[in-house]
Amino acid sequence: MRGKRLSVVVTRRLPDPVEARMKELFNVTLRDDDSRMTTDELADAMASADVLVPSITDHLDAKLLARAGEQLKLIANFGAGVDNIDVATARQRGILVSNTPGVVTEDTADMVMALILGVTRRLAEGLRLAQSSDWQGWSPTAMMGGRIKGRRLGILGMGRIGQAVARRARAFGMEVHYHNRKRLRPEIEEELGATYWESLDQMVARVDVLSINCPHTPSTFHLLNARRLKLMKPDAVIVNTSRGEVIDENALTRMLRAGEIAGAGLDVFERGHLINPRLKELPNAILLPHMGSATVEGRIEMGEKVIVNIKTFEDGHRPPDLVVPSML
């Protein structure tokens, strides 16, 4: 790729400093607004660009990848997750895929704790009451929530984000428990004060708060199904900042409505931005618009990783954040 400026197409608006740097380095086509590209627009972009910079809202399946031009050699995803891309098909077509791992760790872990506190201390309900005309002032028994110190936190997925959550939770005095594909090394368990559960069923039945921090893969789809959700204690709380598909949203909604689970804090949903209308009506659910990693610092760092991946590829080297099917 040496000797010419790469043709780069970006599918969504990125932070101004990131877009400005891309203009300096590449022959870049940016979006005028922040609307999602249509399927045909994505196909046109892949037919003309050397590099495509999609986000998690762009679903690049095998059918769409078949419309890519021969010059497309890199998909530099703006995001850590790549379940929006058929990585195996891309590689078969000679297209490399990179992502932006590690950047969202601290911001997402902060949001997990915000949701845990928000649900257990009933912050959304309190906000609505204070802004209404119904609040008559303080009362000894009004708006009572629960203390998180001493509660058992179960972490499903103990990667970077799960471990960052564990450190924060321990500082709040919570007991840390976890389930993961692979058990952590003893020294990491000791540092985090974390107890490993080989059985997810046994863990979810015993924790007071369950935090979902695993990726969406075929093996994790509806990992929290109706049967497993029914194992949770009726006064337990569930928080999800990972991927909505991990939870059976309909089953969760039914149980929240019936009081079989005390509350939920959700930043992601099974059908993207199409949230179950019945879920929106529940006072014991805090729903956020996928803002777990939405900090200025985090988004700029993600953009910088995208640029490094593209520039390294342009210089004839392997992108540092290359994704291969065996990683998934």
Image (cartoon, rainbow, N blue to C red):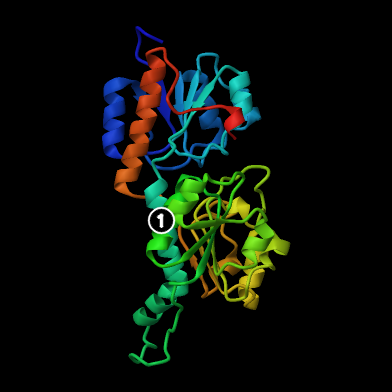
* x then y, percent, for residue 61: 62, 32
Which residue is painted at 47% across and 57% down in the image?
193
Q: Quadrant of the C terminus?
A: top right
- The residue that mark 1 highlights is 167
Q: Is residue 165 visible?
A: no
Q: Is residue 130 left or right of residue 268?
A: left
Indicate the secondary structure of the residue bearing disc 1.
Answer: helix
Q: In front here: 309 or 113?
A: 113
Which residue is painted at 43% across and 75% down in the image?
121
In this rendering, the answer to whether 259 lies above or below 166 is: below
- Tell me the crowding category of disc 1: few under 14, some 14 to 19, or many 20 or more residues within 10 angstroms, Cα based: some
In this rendering, the answer to whether 205 lies above or below 166 is: below
Q: Amino acid at mark 1?
A: Arg
Farthest-out residue, right: 227
* x then y, percent, for residue 31: 38, 34
Q: In front here: 306 or 53?
A: 306
Which residue is painted at 42% across and 26% down in the image?
9
Q: In front here: 129 or 242?
A: 242
